[in-house]
Amino acid sequence: MINFQYLRTTTSKSALALLSKDKAAKFLAGGTNLIDLMKRGVTTPEKLIDINHVPLKQIELKGDTIIIGALASNTAVAEHALIKEKLPLLANALNAGASAQLRNVATVGGNMMQRTRCGYFYDTEMPCNKRQPGSGCGAIGGFNRMHAIFGTSEKCIAVHPSDMCVALIALDATVVLANQKGERKILFKDFHRLAGDTPQLDNNLKTDEMIIRLEIPINNLAKNSHYLKVRDRASYAFALVSVAAALEISDHKITDVRLAMGGVAHKPWRLTASENFLKGKEASTANFELAAKLAMTDAKGFGENDFKLQMAPNSIIEALTLAKSKA
Ligand SMILES: Cc1cc2nc3c(=O)[nH]c(=O)nc-3n(C[C@H](O)[C@H](O)[C@H](O)COP(=O)(O)OP(=O)(O)OC[C@H]3O[C@@H](n4cnc5c(N)ncnc54)[C@H](O)[C@@H]3O)c2cc1C
Ligand code: SF4
């Protein structure tokens, strides 16, 4: 670990002012990912700006929108009565992540910004286009059991590891970002990026910006929703495949549906074609199977992760069935 300067700030304005002086500086939130990356020499910022005392921890309802501050902890969000009642999909996804101790300190903004868990990315002796553009991709033709099956590039097949983000893309969240000039909003689905030719970029946050809050519209999907996470251990393990599924059912017909997956792409993966197929149809196993088949249209395995080509559609069917069966 290299020596670094530690700065503490109490307002987003001063945090952004400090960042504007050194765009290579990093915000320190819970530190559960950033400090690991620094210890391994994957990230080497010379300046850390501790934002834990910036008042961005609100969780509240404003009109028909739920506001969640970027520094609210994963536990605070998952355990909040408003989130449990109105957005159980988000609470369940959060509780499926990491461990209770990690969730107590990990923040919403940090969770969105966490880096991939690809082993080659963490090993500075190995080729990795994400860590060192142009050095190659160790995972293509190497150990790729945890890797992507959708939206891959020849440069990188890593997945985004978050559970929370899978629920947020399904819930049509909006992200509010700020720089020194003011705020801008971006749809959650446009926050993270596919690897393409620039695998070093995980998302569209600019170097002078900070995540301020999330805005999530209230919906009628709370009753029939389920977050399914398939992993190697029952806890403290990243998803092999995960599915956020939510249905609004009226007279046996699906009037609204949300479907997204984790562990399968460089970004949280929304299954829009499957959603469009299901809308207006009966909530039946046959239709769930067809929706799952549709979701797999462009899927591609890389050897060790070929099992995901079967696990993914099975998980979609299971998640939809469990969402439907909620009383
Ligand atoms: C052993 C282990 C198991 C885990 N398992 C899971 C799991 O199963 N599922 C899952 O989803 N996650 C899992 N995690 C990841 C964990 O959720 C993340 O480490 C955590 O959410 C990151 O939040 P943080 O506040 O600690 O971020 P930090 O480590 O402080 O920061 C991460 C990055 O976000 C940036 N950042 C933080 N806040 C902001 C902001 N407001 N604006 C702009 N940039 C910001 C930082 O500069 C840094 O680059 C696991 C982590 C560990 C260590
Ligand atoms: S999959 Fe991406 S993160 Fe992993 S080695 Fe290849 S380039 Fe690096």
Image (cartoon, rainbow, N blue to C red):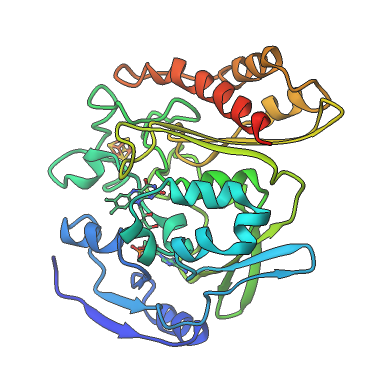
Residue located 23% across and 27% down the image: 143
Provide residue 155's location: percent of width, then percent of height: 36, 33
Residue located 35% across and 40% down the image: 238
Identify whether 26 is placed above or below 221.
below
Q: Is residue 211 left or right of residue 3?
A: right
Identify whether 299 is placed above or below 257.
above
Provide residue 35's location: percent of width, then percent of height: 24, 64
Q: What quarter of the picture does the N terminus occupy?
A: bottom left
Q: What quarter of the picture does the C terminus occupy?
A: top right
Quadrant of residue 255 in the image?
Answer: top right
Residue located 71% across and 29% down the image: 275
Residue located 57% across and 73% down the image: 178
Identify whether 298 is placed above or below 263.
above
Residue 168 shows in this picture: no
Dividing the image into four equal quarters, which quarter contains ligand 1? bottom left
- In this rendered view, identify the residue nearer to me: 217 or 77: 77
Q: Is residue 24 left or right of residue 181?
A: left
Q: Is residue 163 left or right of residue 36?
A: right
Q: How many marks?
A: 0
- In this rendered view, identify the residue nearer to me: 19 or 218: 218
Identify whether 295 is placed above or below 198.
above
Provide residue 266's location: percent of width, then percent of height: 45, 39
